[in-house]
Amino acid sequence: MAGLCVTFCALMSALAVPLLLFFGYLLSNSSPMIEIPEPLKPDAGKGCYMAAGLYAVTLYFAYQKMQEEPESAREVKLNQE
């Protein structure tokens, strides 16, 4: 179950990074494709770039976790006397 959660996080992060970078690019260039007030577009673009960075960090850690070997069940050692 934990493997599915990590895979979901990695997938969502992998999709979010390019999308947020694209939105940040549009907003930084004051594109008319995104309808928010003109004075707010530069700050919104910076916010998109920051969110893309945070998603990239999430993608990195999720990918690292996916590459780890699965832990085996713990074995109980019994004392034989």
Image (tube, rainbow, N blue to C red):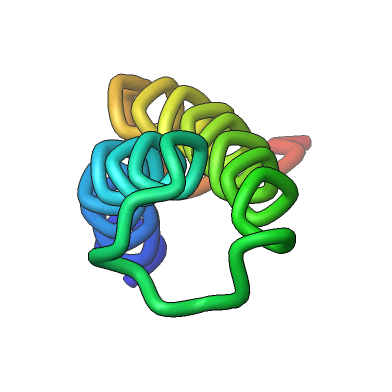
In the rendering, at what x and y percent does residue 28 appear? 51, 37
- The foreground one among 53 and 34 is 34
Q: In which quadrant is the N terminus drawn? A: bottom left
Q: In which quadrant is the C terminus drawn? A: top right
- The foreground one among 23 and 10 is 23
The part of the image, by quadrant, that contains residue 78 is: top right
In the rendering, at what x and y percent does residue 52 appear? 50, 39
Taking the image as shown, residue 38 lies to the left or right of residue 30, namely: right
Taking the image as shown, residue 65 lies to the left or right of residue 38, namely: left
Residue drawn at x 58%, y 30% as measured from the top left: 53
- The answer to whether residue 76 shows anywhere in this view is no
- The foreground one among 72 and 8 is 8
Residue drawn at x 28%, y 41% as measured from the top left: 22
Q: Work out whether 66 lies above or below 26.
A: above
- The answer to whether residue 67 shows anywhere in this view is yes
Residue drawn at x 60%, y 56% as measured from the top left: 41
Q: Work out whether 64 lies above or below 51.
A: above
Q: Work out whether 63 lies above or below 71.
A: above
Number of disc labels: 0
In the rendering, at what x and y percent does residue 55 appear? 51, 42
Residue drawn at x 24%, y 65% as measured from the top left: 33
In the rendering, at what x and y percent does residue 51 appear? 60, 46
